[in-house]
Amino acid sequence: MCLAMPGKIIQIEEKMATVDLSGTMRKTSLQLVPEAKIGDYVLLHAGFAIQVMDESEALETLKMWEAMSETLQ
């Protein structure tokens, strides 16, 4: 099974971004979404941003991830 997580772009340097994944910062390639900009939410998979997301959709997805995480504890 493959999973993708939404994260918020904090910084961009050339084709790489620093993305906030619920408090964890990750370096992510923007090669597949060159239109992404600081403040955008992107869907991340295997080190790549694969889609720019609507902020409300990203926040709703993050709420679902948090609920699943609480269920597993």
Image (cartoon, rainbow, N blue to C red):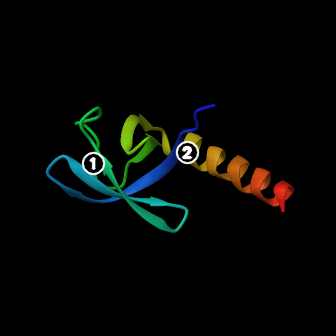
Residue found at x 29% / y 34%: 33
Residue found at x 28% / y 54%: 17
Q: From this viewpoint, which residue is outermost toward the left? A: 14
**Residue tagged 1:** 37
Tally the marks. 2
Across and down, in percent, residue 25 comes to 42, 65
Across and down, in percent, residue 16 comes to 23, 51
Disc 1, SS: loop
Q: Which amino acid does label 2 sit on?
A: Ala
From the viewer's perspective, is residue 47 above or below residue 32? below
Quadrant of the rendering where the C terminus is positioned: bottom right
From the viewer's perspective, is residue 23 above or below residue 72? below
Instruction: Tell me the number on the disc at residue 54.
Output: none
Residue found at x 49% / y 66%: 24
Q: Which one is earlier in the sequence, the residue at label 2 or at label 1?
A: 1
**Residue tagged 2:** 58
- Would residue 13 appear left or right of 40 to someone viewing this image? left
Q: From this viewpoint, which residue is outermost toward the front? A: 1
- Would residue 35 appear left or right of 58 to someone viewing this image? left
